[in-house]
Amino acid sequence: MLADFVWKAHHSMIIDNVSDFTHAYLHRKFKPFTDAKLTRLETIGDQVQVAYDTKVGRGRISGLLIDREAVNTNSMELCYEYPYQWSNTDDKIKSYCFVLPIDAQTTRAFFLFYFKGFKVPLLPLALPRWAMDPILKIARHTLVRPLLQEDGDAVEAEQDGYNAFWSAPIAELNPAVHAFQDLTIRKWEEFLASEGGGEQRVRLPVQQAE
Ligand SMILES: [Fe+2]
């Protein structure tokens, strides 16, 4: 399943958002993840690897379709594998997020989702393959796009906040987000270094919340 959006936000804000599970409240209606606890955070080369213990897909609609007997929905692995992001729930549910910067504050974001299978709602039966496509089509409009648009609204508000208070300290509590930002900045600096010579660019100091 593919969903794409154009959001008025810097591409790094979208990358930061999709692997940051501290915003369950934003998604309180759809509950894609709840009670998240960061269990792993490691930067290896151009990857920031993250894992959370969390309850995956406990919303009203997703809870009906996801077979919790067959899929371990108690944890999720995520990775910012520059320049894109992916997630994996028990090798049964996978997602990818790709960002296409349009300008400094506009980004087209592409989300790809893979589901190994669904179950028949209220019954312990696997949904047949032929029934997956129409269900995915309905889920795309009733669940996935509205859920992702919540992230879109959040990153656009974050961009507005940055524009108004860009010199204020960053109020970011999730250490994973700092690791994502470090990787993005490092790749940008590597790019500038590869350009060589030219005008000298100076990195602005970053203030972080205590
Ligand atoms: Fe989100």
Image: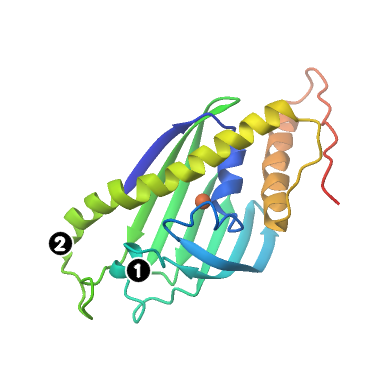
For label 2, the residue is 131
Q: Is residue 21 above or below residue 188?
A: below
At 56% from the left and 34% from the top, the residue drawn is 156
Report crowding for label 2: few under 14, some 14 to 19, many 20 or more residues within 10 A (C-alpha). Answer: few
Q: Distance between the residues labelled 1 and 2?
A: 17 Å
Under tag 2, what secondary structure? helix
Q: Which of 58 and 41 is in front in this view?
A: 58
The reply to whether the residue tagged 1 has its Cβ within 8 angstroms of ligand 1 is no
Q: Residue 63 carries which label?
A: 1
At 34% from the left and 58% from the top, the residue drawn is 114
Q: In this view, does 148 lie to the left or right of 45?
A: left
Residue 26: horizontal and vertical position, in percent? Answer: 53, 51
Q: Which mark is residue 33?
A: none
Residue 122: horizontal and vertical position, in percent? Answer: 23, 75
| Nearest-to-viewer mark from 1 and 2 | 1
Q: In this view, does 89 lie to the left or right of 82?
A: left
Q: In this view, does 185 lie above or below 67?
A: above
At 69% from the left and 35% from the top, the residue drawn is 188
Dot 2 amino acid type:
Ala
Q: Nearer the viewer, residue 45 or 59?
A: 59
Residue 37 makes an appearance in the image: yes
